[in-house]
Image (cartoon, grey):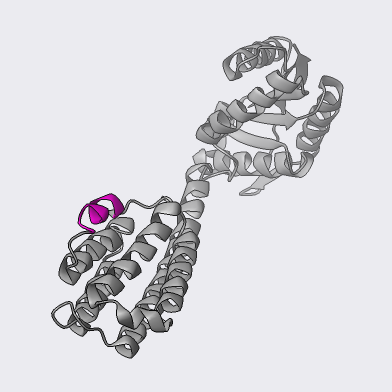
Amino acid sequence: MPSTEKITDVVKKSCEEIKESIKGEDIEKNDAAEVIKNVIETFFTQLRKSGYSVYLDEYLEYEHEKKSKKCIDLAKESIYSFKESNTNLKNIAESHTIEIESIVDNSTEIDIPRFKSRIEAFQNDLMEELQRANELIKSLESEIEELQKQSNIDPLTKLYNRKALEIDAKELLKHSNERNLNMALLMIDADDFKKVNDTFGHLAGDKVLILLAKLFKLSIREYDRAYRYGGEEFLIIFNRTGKEETRRVAERIMNAVRNNKLIYKGKVIRITLSMGLTAHQKGDTLESMIERADAAVYQAKNEGKDRLVVR
């Protein structure tokens, strides 16, 4: 479906052509049905050129029938068809086609000034309604965008969630595989997190996760992304970054976490991290990269925790 702005352009252009066509003195030599026929054909043609579904073919089948009522009925059908979802536009179209029809007297004479005024009124009313519809569409698009954003955010840490990870990784891996671009994935697991929950309670555990999320955000670039993968596990995707550069960022994050302490109800909570880092390889999928990073985290845990393993 073409955009609302395009509908506005089509209506404006066709109405301008209609007004031009009824200015000529020779138009008064034609009967009312001929005038209506020309008006509708102009409007239909503009809509058809712009990709809207109209009844031009059906109208042309009846071209030999010089009946204004038939023309008006077809005009109403066509106007309805190009914006069926907007009830107000249907009402405007119906109102104006009835008014235009009333100007015609037995398909033999037409009141040109009145006809011109009704065409102008039709244009103005339609343009105003299209503008209102456009404003509503923009408002709805903004709301949808915000809802979409919220659906991709973990409510506790405010990091991106697994749904966002799958969407982002698909696009990044496509570019990395096609253009041989650097990309790295860092998996992070908070060491002994269950002990934090058991010792201090789940609220304290939540505060630890929030603190970690803030430290991750402060450590990465704007075009890198951090995700809560599940529980106390996190992923960071580094876009267009090689393994060594990512290693330096990972070590910076580990040091930041070591040097930060969380005071909860007068007690100090300290956290360390086990990390697994892997760089993109030709043909990688998200699953294959996560599998390598997860194996690296497992190795880091087995070797004593609080360390980074690269695979």
Q: Nearer the viewer, residue 15 or 308?
A: 15
| Residue at 72 percent of width and 37 percent of height | 224
Position of the C terminus by quadrant: top right
Is 59 inside the magenta-drawn segment? Answer: yes
Task: Kindly tell me whether residue 170 is visible in this rendering.
Answer: yes
Residue extending furthest left? 106
Q: Name the chief secondary structure element in magenta.
A: helix
When the figure is inspected, residue 295 is found, relative to residue 102, above or below; the finding is above
Q: Quadrant of residue 279?
A: top right
Task: Kindly tell me whether residue 268 is visible in this rendering.
Answer: no
Q: Quadrant of residue 206?
A: top right
Residue 166's x, y, as percent? 54, 28
Is 73 inside the magenta-drawn segment? Answer: no
Residue 210's x, y, as percent? 62, 44
Q: Is residue 201 left or right of residue 25?
A: right
Number of numbered callouts drawn: 0
| Residue at 76 percent of width and 15 percent of height | 309
Q: Is residue 303 left or right of residue 57?
A: right
When the figure is inspected, residue 151 is found, relative to residue 274, above or below; the finding is below
Q: Tell me where the magenta segment starts and ends, as one range.
A: 56-63
Q: Nearer the viewer, residue 115 or 60?
A: 60
When the figure is inspected, residue 203 is found, relative to residue 32, above or below; the finding is above
Residue 188's x, y, as percent? 67, 26
Q: Nearer the viewer, residue 149 or 306?
A: 149
Residue 189's x, y, as percent? 64, 25
| Residue at 24 percent of width and 59 percent of height | 63
